[in-house]
């Protein structure tokens, strides 16, 4: 049992094993699971949640949580598409404004968390609803006929029989960038330190509030980028999008071995976590399990992952 | 009565420091004076304002009123980094390390060494090897027997953690080190390790302020003892001229000091 537990709590080993086990299970359930085209499909589905989960990881590392990420993304996607299609702004400008809108929401989250010292859970529950309402106020229907620039990242190229979406490359590049910052720069060390104990980090000479504000803002910008990937994948600006993305992204982060108690975790674990979420969704779909059971399974997954996190803390 | 400290240089002086939290007066026009190269112990009951006093000196909080002079010049610290930039290092009560980071990262937190070339300048790449190497040197200088600077601080014993915190301060302090109850959580053996460190730091010519509740320790290492009571400096005594029970009596207000150690 202790062997199993220490194995499960090794940073990225646990998530990797879970990923392999899930793949093996689903390949016994459906012939279509282990095919190149299905693999492309999973990657495409993972691209949006996987990108959101990058911002979510940064915030959870600081002992925070972001419930608003999916709806900030929905808001940003409606802003960028509507400005381009209805208002007639240059697509590039419209896209940048949309990403900026995500950043603005992130900044507001960060401002409320650092300056007013409100708990991230409540702050982002509030901005979740605000973003949701603003999206609906701005547009009740899907925005169609998008400019090429906004759907270009949905195009694919092929390696062998596998089609890869350009957006997946964007996601992977972002993972590499954030991995570098966390692992190799002073800022990375500071993020882990403030997640561990913000007051202690402040006393040790880190400008905790400034860094936290920056993290929330950057996370917002990442959600804006996820909005562009979402739009590219769907080919429309959808005001209904992103509603399950909150839980999916948190699940990905926790499955990836990042502790909800802050200060511990690995961004590449999050990528594995996002893949696990994607594989479960896809595998259950192929098995013909109805959508509502997929939601049920996601709920179970997050609780299992949090329990492992808690157990490993108690062991230390 | 003549004191050795009289012909010494004052390195830090604060006058009339006041800090209130709502109805609680943590500091009530407190004064403090520190000479170059000495160990000044601060004693006082729980809640006497010892931690608040040193937090005001180290920039962890901004006092409501009062002035602080460092090397004769008036200073005004808004945060711990500003005090640190002026050569004041502090080991805070209970919050002295970042447990999730390794020893080297703890020593260099907030002042990491970057690669010298474009990798550092543009890509902000940390120079891990240099930091590990220097961390080992600093730790060896203070004879702290920890093998790997890669060891996560959360896996260290209480005494080893405190040693890391003290070493971090000693490595970077140019003027003085402030320590808030550095031995409070430690056993006898680990306490004596930390006391030994404090003496070593003093022998390098640095000045030290150390808060402690442990009278034998205080009397063993302090050159002078600052007695804090009800948010004020009640007295400063020379440990050679007072007994421990006298010090405690002054601390609790049942006795007045007959002489002041400047
Ligand atoms: N952040 C704060 N908010 C409210 N009151 C505080 C705060 N910090 C300190 N105090 C109060 O100020 C007074 C002095 O506290 P301080 O921590 O300086 O005492 P201390 O002498 O260090 O005590 P101890 O020996 O227990 O560490 C106490 O009454 C304490 O309750
Ligand atoms: Mg105290």
Image (cartoon, rainbow, N blue to C red):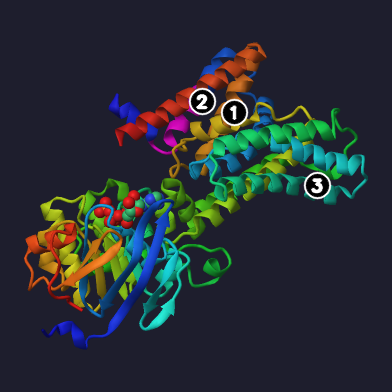
Residue B31 lies in quadrant: bottom left
Looking at the image, which residue is at 56% across and 45% down?
A113
> Which residue carries the number 2 mark?
A302
Q: SS class of the residue under badge 3?
A: helix
> Which residue carries the number 1 mark?
A247
Q: Is residue B133 visible?
A: no
Which is the main secondary structure of the residues drawn in magenta? helix
Residues marked 1 and 2 touching at CB (< 8 Å): yes
**What is the span of residues highlighted in magenta in the rendered image?**
A10-21
Q: Nearer the viewer, residue A20 or B145?
A: B145
Q: Chain of mark 1?
A: A
Residues marked 3 and 2 touching at CB (< 8 Å): no
Above or below — where is B145 with respect to A259?
Answer: below
Magenta-span inclusion, residue A108: no
Q: Residues within 10 Å of mark 2 (few under 14, many from 20)?
A: many
Mark 3 / mark 2, whichever is N-terminal: 3
Above or below — where is A146 with respect to B68?
Answer: above
Q: Is residue B147 left or right of residue A67?
A: left
Mark 1 / mark 2, whichever is N-terminal: 1
Magenta-span inclusion, residue A18: yes
Residue A235 lies in quadrant: top right
State the CA–CA distance, disc 1 to disc 2.
8 Å
Q: Position of residue B225 (x, y in %)?
A: 18, 69
Mark 3 / mark 1, whichever is N-terminal: 3
Q: Is residue B139 visible?
A: yes
Q: Is residue A114 left or right of residue B6?
A: right
User: Which quadrant does the N terminus of chain B fall into?
Assistant: bottom left
Q: Position of residue B136 (x, y in %)?
A: 28, 64
Q: SS class of the residue under badge 1?
A: helix
User: Which quadrant does the C terminus of chain B fall into?
Assistant: bottom left
């Amino acid at each position: 049992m202790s062997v199993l537990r220490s194995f499960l709590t090794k940073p990225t080993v646990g998530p990797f094993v879970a990923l392999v086990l899930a793949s093996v299970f689903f390949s016994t359930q459906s012939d279509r699971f282990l095919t190149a085209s299905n693999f492309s499909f999973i990657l495409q589905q993972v691209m949006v949640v996987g990108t959101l989960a990058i911002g979510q990881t940064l915030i959870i590392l600081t002992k925070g949580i972001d419930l608003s990420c999916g709806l900030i993304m929905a808001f940003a996607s409606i802003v960028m598409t509507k400005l381009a299609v209805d208002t007639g702004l240059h697509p590039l400008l419209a896209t940048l404004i949309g990403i900026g809108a995500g950043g603005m929401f992130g900044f507001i989250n960060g401002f409320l968390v650092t300056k007013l010292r409100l708990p991230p859970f409540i702050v982002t529950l509030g901005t979740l609803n605000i973003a949701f309402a603003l999206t609906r106020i701005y547009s009740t229907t899907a925005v169609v006929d998008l400019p090429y620039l906004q759907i270009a990242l949905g195009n694919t190229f092929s390696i062998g029989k596998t089609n890869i979406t350009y957006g997946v490359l964007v996601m992977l590049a972002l993972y590499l960038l954030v991995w570098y910052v966390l692992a190799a720069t002073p800022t990375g060390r500071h993020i882990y330190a403030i997640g561990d104990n913000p007051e202690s980090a402040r006393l040790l000479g880190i400008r905790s509030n400034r860094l936290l504000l920056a993290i929330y803002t950057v996370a917002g910008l990442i959600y804006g980028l996820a909005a562009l990937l979402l739009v590219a994948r769907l080919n429309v600006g959808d005001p209904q999008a992103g509603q399950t993305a909150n839980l999916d992204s948190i699940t990905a982060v926790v499955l990836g071995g990042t502790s909800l108690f802050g200060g511990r975790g690995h961004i590449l674990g999050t990528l594995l976590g996002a893949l696990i979420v994607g594989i479960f969704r896809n595998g259950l779909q192929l098995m013909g399990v109805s959508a509502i059971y997929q939601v049920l399974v996601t709920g179970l997954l997050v609780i299992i992952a949090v329990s492992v996190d808690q157990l490993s803390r108690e062991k230390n | 009565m003549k004191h050795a400290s009289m012909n010494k240089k004052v390195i830090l002086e604060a006058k009339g420091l006041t800090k209130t939290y709502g109805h609680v007066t943590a500091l009530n026009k407190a004064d403090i004076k520190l000479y170059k190269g000495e160990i000044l112990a601060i004693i006082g009951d729980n809640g006497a304002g010892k931690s608040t006093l040193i937090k005001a000196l180290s920039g962890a909080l901004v006092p409501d009123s009062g002035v602080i002079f460092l090397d004769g010049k008036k200073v005004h610290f808004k945060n711990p980094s500003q005090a640190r930039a002026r050569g004041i290092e502090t080991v805070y009560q209970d919050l002295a390390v970042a447990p999730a980071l390794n020893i080297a990262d703890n020593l260099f937190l907030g002042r990491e060494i970057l690669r010298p070339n474009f990798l550092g300048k543009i890509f902000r790449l940390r120079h891990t090897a240099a930091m590990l190497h220097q961390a080992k040197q600093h730790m060896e200088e203070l004879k702290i027997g920890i093998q790997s600077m890669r060891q996560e601080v959360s896996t260290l014993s209480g005494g080893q953690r405190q040693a890391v915190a003290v070493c971090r301060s000693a490595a970077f302090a140019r003027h003085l080190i402030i320590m808030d109850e550095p031995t409070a959580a430690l056993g006898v053996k680990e306490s004596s390790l930390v006391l030994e460190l404090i003496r070593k730091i003093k022998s390098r010519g640095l000045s030290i302020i150390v808060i402690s509740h442990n009278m034998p320790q205080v009397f063993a290492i302090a050159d002078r003892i600052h007695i804090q009571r009800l948010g004020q400096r009640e007295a400063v005594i020379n440990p050679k001229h007072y007994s421990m029970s006298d010090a405690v009596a002054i601390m609790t207000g049942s006795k007045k000091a007959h002489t002041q150690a400047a």
